[in-house]
Image (cartoon, rainbow, N blue to C red):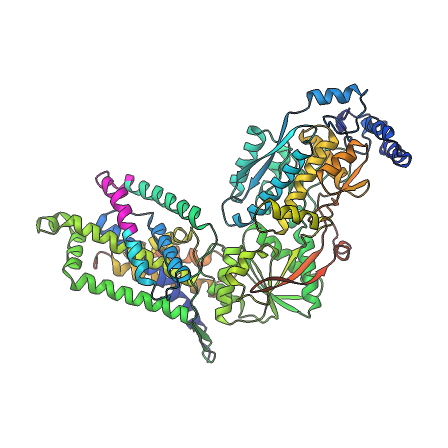
């Protein structure tokens, strides 16, 4: 008995996985720093290239490169935020948004100058598991991407719910002024948010480099989906971002598979149709305001 | 004095001039050769005439005051325009085209320049974006005042075709394969500009390239195929042209899937394609997408013979997916024209760019434009347009470089530029024929499997 939708479900989960990890970082910045960071895509690209350097040039194992990717990305993102965004934090959302667009452009072209436009792959020598009777297969790469995301989501959940810093972040997300008067060092928390969000952006980029290869425009090309996932799930909600990412990934895969093949844009189009429908029904996104970081 | 078609004496015809030239050749008298240069003012072959004006080494008649005037009033410098893919998804192809163009420009200047004028190239980035290309062409024509353009891809020319006709500056380009250009460029072989199309290409079109690919595939007993192609003009053109050629010669395409380019993953599209039954599949997308698709195809284990479009014949493909794509066929217009060997040696010395068909064809594009100016005696767009055919079509002294052509023209001879990429025998529509080479991908590079000769393809193309 063949189950053709299973194959598309796997593809959708893989697509959703790297969108989810990117969206976690994006939505944390949105929820706690109150800015839409358009340079988030480039933070992802930074992670992709750090991973390439680690795994392909320095010879680290693919999994072994995860930690340096997250650490370096975190420091780079935090450093840039402190130099570029924090001094402008009182200027309002529009200057910050435009600044982030500019920073993204600078980073993208800077990476292009150094890394050249060629596509870089992190090679993963993993087997493919075939289930011919059921009509699907799953590769080691698929499992790595889905598994990494699962671990990342659980880690974020534990951090937010079991640690003092995580609880402080949630409190700050709900009401920064109130958090401040209760003694929470909001400046320190903001710094931690930048570190964690940038680390997750780097991880998402690295997952892209392992899965599909990285170019200087890799992160930017995924940014629209990342933002869409965050809004779909409920802007500012970490769990919502993850849910939104998987809804998007599965929608795209099923649309490509089961809608007419001449309609090449239908996959992405359907993702946005879902976004519009969800927002019409639930303006706050899938998870609304119920579960915020 | 060299003159344009507009100011030629139409009572004279090509026969008169060629007769004198032939006589000059038979007698071997240098003076007659010079005389031919002067006699040639009639330009009755539908184009303006060769001149020695401005050429210190040329064989111009010292008593020809008109030529002296040309020397005195000729341009001090000539700048050609080059819209370039310095950024964007095709940027990996530009280094070879730039290196070839610069090589040709250097050779032209070493030969004394065109009409004695130093030549340069103004290169501006379009990122192969039609809107950007339109801006760049405007900048080149209006700001840089270039008399000819050495570039533009199919994706740019097709939507801008009417604009380019209105601009009325000849575009001689090494890039486009689009079938839409099969019957739209060139000079129709007539003497007037009225029916001209201002686009010429020194690389074979998709109609010829895909016909060669289809012939090869059918010869290998592949009777059914699937096609996965991108939606940009170049990819669509290749895919449609290949499909027509393949099905027109007895093959069957059982499934064709178009994909939006620039995506991170194509797993679902591949799965959709491979639900169909076929012997082999063709892939027509840009290099970056192709590497992703080939990796996903390999890891999924879909199997079946792969045919890659010509644009993917690049060392980066080998570097990224040489192992995964091992055994895949890639059909491309042969870059090895009559003078390829002499060109490639100079190319290697000129820089470290990876050579490819379009890079070689860029050398030819630059040379034919330069020779057209030299033959016409004026660096204005109309003169170049009228002289492109005459310097490259069959007949006259065969030359392979600007220096050779310049010398022959100075001797009053007609010339036939034989190129590095193809013979550059322009058809009436400004197109060229060339061999189609089929290679297979190996981890170490491309290995030539066979060649479909241009002569075998000529009879199979109706209008081109």
Q: Quadrant of the N terminus of chain B?
A: top right
Question: Is residue B362 visible to us here?
Answer: yes
Q: Nearer the viewer, residue B254 or B294?
A: B294
Taking A292 as reference, is B194 left or right?
right
B197 drawn magenta: no
**Above or below for A71 versus B4:** below
Depth check, front residue: A278 or B24: B24
Q: Magenta part of the protein: which range?
A: A76-95
In the image, taking residue A232 as reference, residue A87 lies left or right, namely left
x and y percentages locating residue A27 in the rendered image:
27, 54
User: Is B96 rendered above or below residue A278?
Assistant: above
Q: Is residue A260 visible?
A: no
Q: Position of residue B125 (x, y in %)?
A: 52, 40
Residues B348 and B452: in front is B348
Judged by its main secondary structure, the magenta piece is: helix
- Between A139 and B366, the one lying in front of the other is B366
Left or right of B168 in this view: A241: left
As drawn, which residue projects farthest toward the front?
A: B349
Instruction: Indicate the position of residue A110 as horizontal and vertical percent values.
Output: 40, 45
Point 8% across, 51% down: residue: A182
Q: Is residue B277 above or below residue B127?
A: below
Residue at the outermost left position: A182
Q: Is residue A81 magenta?
A: yes
- Residue B330 at x, y percent in the picture: 62, 61
């Amino acid at each position: 008995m063949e189950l053709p939708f299973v194959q598309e479900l796997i593809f959708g989960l893989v697509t959703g996985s790297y969108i989810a990890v990117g969206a976690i970082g994006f939505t944390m910045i949105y929820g706690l720093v109150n800015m839409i960071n358009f340079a988030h895509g480039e933070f992802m690209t930074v992670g992709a290239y750090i991973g390439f350097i680690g795994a392909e040039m320095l010879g680290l194992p693919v999994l072994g490169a995860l930690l340096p990717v997250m650490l370096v990305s975190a420091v780079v993102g935090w450093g840039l935020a402190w130099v570029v965004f924090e001094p402008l934090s009182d200027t309002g959302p529009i200057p910050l948004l435009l600044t982030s667009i500019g920073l993204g452009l600078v980073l993208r072209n800077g990476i292009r100058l150094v890394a050249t436009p060629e596509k870089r792959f992190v090679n993963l020598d993993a087997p493919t598991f075939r289930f011919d009777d059921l009509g699907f297969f799953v590769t080691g790469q698929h499992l790595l991407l889905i598994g990494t995301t699962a671990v990342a989501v659980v880690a974020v959940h534990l951090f937010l719910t079991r640690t003092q810093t995580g609880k402080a972040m949630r409190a700050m997300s709900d009401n920064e002024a109130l958090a401040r008067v209760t003694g929470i060092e909001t400046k320190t928390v903001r710094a931690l948010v930048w570190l964690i969000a940038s680390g997750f952006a780097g991880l998402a980029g690295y997952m892209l480099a392992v899965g599909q290869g990285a170019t200087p425009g890799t992160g930017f090309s995924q940014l629209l989906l990342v933002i869409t996932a965050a809004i779909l799930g409920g802007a500012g909600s970490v769990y919502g971002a993850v849910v939104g990412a998987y809804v998007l990934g599965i929608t795209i895969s099923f649309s490509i598979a089961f809608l007419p093949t001449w309609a090449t844009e239908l996959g992405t189009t359907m993702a946005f149709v879902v976004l519009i429908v969800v927002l019409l029904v639930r303006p706050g996104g899938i998870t609304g305001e119920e579960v915020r970081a | 004095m060299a003159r344009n078609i507009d100011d030629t004496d139409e009572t004279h015809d090509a026969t008169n001039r060629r007769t004198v030239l032939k006589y000059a050749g038979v007698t071997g008298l240098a003076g007659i050769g010079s005389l031919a240069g002067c006699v040639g003012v009639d330009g009755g072959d539908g184009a303006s005439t060769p001149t020695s004006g401005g050429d210190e080494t040329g064989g111009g008649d010292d008593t020809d005051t008109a030529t002296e005037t040309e020397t005195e009033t000729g341009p001090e410098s000539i700048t050609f325009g080059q819209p370039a893919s310095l950024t964007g998804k095709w940027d990996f192809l530009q280094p070879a085209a730039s290196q070839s163009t610069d090589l040709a420009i250097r050779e032209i200047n070493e030969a004394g320049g065109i009409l004695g004028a130093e030549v340069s190239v103004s290169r501006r980035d379009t990122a192969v974006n039609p809107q950007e290309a339109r801006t760049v062409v405007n900048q080149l024509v209006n700001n840089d005042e270039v008399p000819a353009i050495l570039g533009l891809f199919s994706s740019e020319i097709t939507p801008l075709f009417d604009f380019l006709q209105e601009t009325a500056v000849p575009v001689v380009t090494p890039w486009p394969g689009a079938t839409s250009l099969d019957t739209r460029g060139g000079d129709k072989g007539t003497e007037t500009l009225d029916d001209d199309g201002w686009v010429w290409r020194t690389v074979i079109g998709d109609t010829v390239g895909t016909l060669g690919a289809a012939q090869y595939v059918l010869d290998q007993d592949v009777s059914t195929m699937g096609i996965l192609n991108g939606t940009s003009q170049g990819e669509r053109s290749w895919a449609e042209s290949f499909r027509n050629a393949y099905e027109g010669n007895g093959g069957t395409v059982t499934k064709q899937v178009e994909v939006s380019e620039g995506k991170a993953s194509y797993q679902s599209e591949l799965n959709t394609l491979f639900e169909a039954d076929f012997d082999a599949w063709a892939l027509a997308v840009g290099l970056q997408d192709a590497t992703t698709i080939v990796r996903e195809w390999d890891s999924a284990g879909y199997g079946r013979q792969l045919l890659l479009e010509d644009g993917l014949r690049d060392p980066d493909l080998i570097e990224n997916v040489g192992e995964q794509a091992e055994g895949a066929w890639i059909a491309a217009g042969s870059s090895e024209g009559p003078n390829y060997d002499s060109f490639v040696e100079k190319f290697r010395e000129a820089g470290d760019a990876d050579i490819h068909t379009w890079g070689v064809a860029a050398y030819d594009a630059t040379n034919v434009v330069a020779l057209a100016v030299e033959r016409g005696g004026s660096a204005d767009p109309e003169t170049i347009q009228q002289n492109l055919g005459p310097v490259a079509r069959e007949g006259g002294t065969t030359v392979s470089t600007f220096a050779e052509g310049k010398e022959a023209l100075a001797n009053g001879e007609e010339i036939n530029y034989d190129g590095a990429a193809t013979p550059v025998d322009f058809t009436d529509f400004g197109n060229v024929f060339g061999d189609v080479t089929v290679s297979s991908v190996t981890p170490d590079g491309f290995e030539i499997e066979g060649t479909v000769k241009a002569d075998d393809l000529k009879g199979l193309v109706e209008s081109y």
